[in-house]
Amino acid sequence: NAGVMQNPRHLVRRRGQEARLRCSPMKGHSHVYWYRQLPEEGLKFMVYLQKENIIDESGMPKERFSAEFPKEGPSILRIQQVVRGDSAAYFCASSPPASTGYEQYFGPGTRLTVT
Amino acid sequence: GQSLEQPSEVTAVEGAIVQINCTYQTSGFYGLSWYQQHDGGAPTFLSYNALDGLEETGRFSSFLSRSDSYGYLLLQELQMKDSASYFCAVVTGFQKLVFGTGTRLLVSP
C-alpha cells in the first residue's frame, strides 16, 4: 500500500511566481491535512479537507493561499505571488474515514525555496 | 490560545532511558499524540493517549495526566537510530492536531 505521496519534493520559485504543491493521500483515506514547517520549528496546521470540501482552513493565511481536494486527482495547495517568507517545508497528511485524526500519515514533504 | 511546551534538546547515550516532557494549554483537548521526525524526513506516528495513564508500545511508552495538562514520552534501550526530533501534538477538536515545537534527541555511543 503506497504511502502519502507529495510532489514535487523540492520547488524553487522567484518572488511573485505561483507555487503548486500536490498530495495524493494513502489509498482509502478520505481526510487530507496540510502543514507548514519552518526550520527548527514544529508543524503548523494550515487546512483540513475532505473530497470536494474544505472543512477547516483556520490555519491558512487569508491571502495568496488556497487549497482544494477535488473528486478526482490529488489535493493541491496553491500559493500565489510567493514571497521569501513562504520558504518552508510543506507536509501533507492523510487519515482513514473512521479516524478522529490523532494518527495521521505524513508524506515526505515539499521543500519550497523562494529566491 | 494554544501552547505546548517541550524541552528543545535532550542528550543521552545508547542503552539509556530518556523522558521527553510535554505540558499543554489548549482551548480543547481530546488526547495527546507523539510523532518522531528524522532530519529531512516525514513525521511518523508513535503513540496516542486519550485517557490518563501509561501506554506501552515496545521500547516506547507514553503517559498522560489530564488534570496536570502534562504528558511524556519514555524511550528505553536507546539506539543511535532514535536520534530524531520528537513532537507532542494535542487533538484539540475534530481532526485537528496542534503540534509542539519539538525536542531534538541526540543519542551518542
Image (cartoon, rainbow, N blue to C red):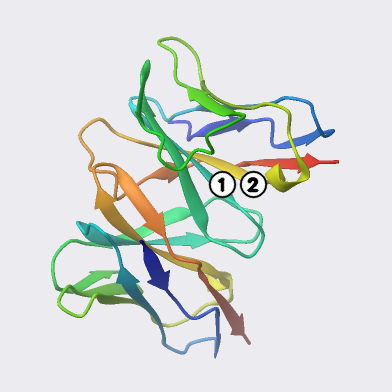
Label annotation for residue A88: none
Nearer to me, B43 or A41: A41
Badge 1: residue crowd in 10 Å (few <14, some 14–19, many ≥20) = many
Badge 2: residue crowd in 10 Å (few <14, some 14–19, many ≥20) = many
Host chain of mark 2: A
- Marks 2 & 1, CB-CB < 8 Å contact: yes
Task: Residue A81: name its quadrant.
Answer: top right
Q: Position of residue A77 (x, y in %)?
A: 56, 28
Gap in angstroms between the C-alphas marked 2 and 1? 6 Å
What residue is shown with label 1? A36
Is residue B102 placed above or below A86 in the rendered structure?
below
Is residue A31 placed above or below B68 in the rendered structure?
above
Q: Position of residue A89 (x, y in %)?
A: 64, 46
**Residue type for callout 1:** Arg
Host chain of mark 1: A
Nearer to me, B101 or A106: B101
Where disc 2 sits, the SS reads strand
Q: Are marks 2 and 1 on the same chain?
A: yes
Label annotation for residue A89: 2
Left or right: residue B33 compared with residue B36? left
Where disc 1 sits, the SS reads strand
Q: Position of residue B64 (x, y in %)?
A: 22, 74
Left or right: residue A8 compared with residue A56? right
Q: Is residue A108 visible?
A: no
Name which residue lies at 38% across and 28% down.
A49
Left or right: residue B77 compared with residue A87? left
Quadrant that contains the C terminus of chain B: bottom right
Q: Position of residue A5 (x, y in %)?
A: 55, 31
